Structure formats: C-alpha cells, structure tokens
Image (cartoon, grey):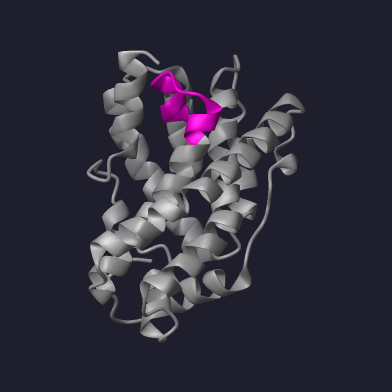
Amino acid sequence: MSVLMLAGLLLLADSRLPTGGHVHSGGVEALVDRGMLASTEDLARLLDGRVRTAGLVGASAAAAAVLVSGQPAPRWRVWDRAADVRIPSPALREVSRAQGGALLRTVTLAWPGYPPLCALAELGRAHQPLVLGAAVAAGGGSPEQAAALAVHHLVGGAASAAVRLLGLDPLRVAAVQIELAPLADRVAGRATEAATRAVAADDPDLLPSDATPLPEILAQLHHNSEVTLFAS
C-alpha cells in the first residue's frame, strides 16, 4: 500500500473528519429513550444486527461506488436511486443525504478536480455510501477497503453515541467493537462480492437490500420527537 493510499484511507476513517457524523447516534438514542438499550451487552446485540443488515447494504453501495468511479461515464443517478430505495425510512434517507453532502464538500477539497466526485456533486446531495466509495477511489483505495470503512463508520458512530448517552465504560465499548471485527470483515467481504456482481452487470438491483423494521420505525419516531440530543 502506498503512503498516499494509506493517508487517504486514514483520513476517511478519522472520526474528526468534519462530516457531521458526531450529531447522529445510529439509532442508539431512540433505543435508549425507550429503555431498550442500557448496557454494553445491549449495544453488542444492536451492532451485531445492524452490521448484518444496514451495514451490508451500506458497505455494498460503497464498494460499488469505487468500481463505478472507474467507469468512463458513471451513471451516478441510477446508483443513487438504488441506495434510496434501500432505506425505507424518510428520516434515514435524509440523514444519509445530509452526511453524503457534508462528506462530499470535505473530500472535494482533499481531492479537487477528481471527475467521479465532480459528477456526484451534480446530483446535489448523494447518499453517503456512494460519496464514501468515490472518495476511497480518489485516494487510491479498493472496493474491499470502502466496504470495510462503511461498516467501521456504522459501528463507530453508534458506539460513540452509546458512551455519550449512557456513560458506558469506553474501554468495554471498545472491546465490543473489537469483538465485532471478524463479523465486520465477513460482511465487508460479502458486500464487495455483491457490488462486483452488480457493477459487472450494470444492475444496481443486484445490491443487497437486507433490513430490519424496528430501527426504521424508531428513526421516524425519533425524527418526530421534540427534544433530542442527536439528529438521528
């Protein structure tokens, strides 16, 4: 791995990257408010399920975006619509687009003039996994690395929110994240395989669409709440 590639990937993995991720809890706040998440054990179960569903979906979109970035004329609008229909909750679709827009503004400053990022900007606010994948491509990374980063972001955001909301021991929360690493690697591998098939067939319908109803329902309830610490 070149120094340039490593530096770019470390930048995208850094929680200090100014993309607004710190204002989102990944559904943790809605669960905490309803007494459904109160311990590191609860957090571990939540993350296990989210990695297998939303994690797989987001990771496959990110991996596909790396491959699509290498095409002469990426059809970003088609892939963006595919991401849209895989997020049933309007609130979560808005979250994904808001984070995608913030990430795009950041990475276009890091890699100015990179054509796939410029093309994504023409959509307005693309979904976050697509922007992440295009940014990984700009930094010289691979689909596998984009998928791993997508899962990393999902887990890291929820874990950080759980510490802030519940005062959990950050060392134990870090241990939960480490224990999830083998699952995260497997999911990133599945996502990459699915993305490779979808892009080779030029058919975004082949991307995974795994989901669980409860997080989507809670996201809407959280969105309609009057007082919250996190935006989602």
Task: Find residue 170 and report its horizontal and vertical position in percent.
Answer: 25, 62
Q: Residue at x 44, y 74 (%)?
A: 42
Q: Quadrant of residue 26?
A: bottom left
Picture residue at 54% right of the left edge, 28% below the top? 143
In front of the other: 24 or 55: 55
**Residue at position x 48%, y 39% in the image:** 148
Assign the magenta stretch its main secondary structure: helix
| Res. 123 visible in picture | no
The residues colored magenta run: 134-146
Answer with the quarter of the image where residue 25 lies: bottom left
Q: Is residue 21 magenta?
A: no
Residue 168, placed above or below residue 125: below
In the picture, measured across the screen, residue 33 lies left or right of residue 126, that is: left
Residue 219 vertical placement versus 51 (above, below): below
Q: Quadrant of the C terminus?
A: bottom left
Q: Is residue 212 above or below residue 145?
A: below
Residue 132 point in image, percent of width and height: 44, 36
On-image quarter of the N terminus: top left
Figure disc tally? 0
Left/right of residue 114 with respect to residue 84 in the rendered view: left
Q: Position of residue 75 (x, y in %)?
A: 62, 28
**Residue 138 within the magenta-colored segment of the rendering:** yes
Image position, residue 135 (x, y; %): 41, 29
Foreground residue among 195 and 203: 195
Left or right relative to 182: residue 178: left
Q: Nearer the viewer, residue 229 or 28?
A: 28
Seen from this angle, which residue lies furthest right? 201
Residue 84 in sight: yes
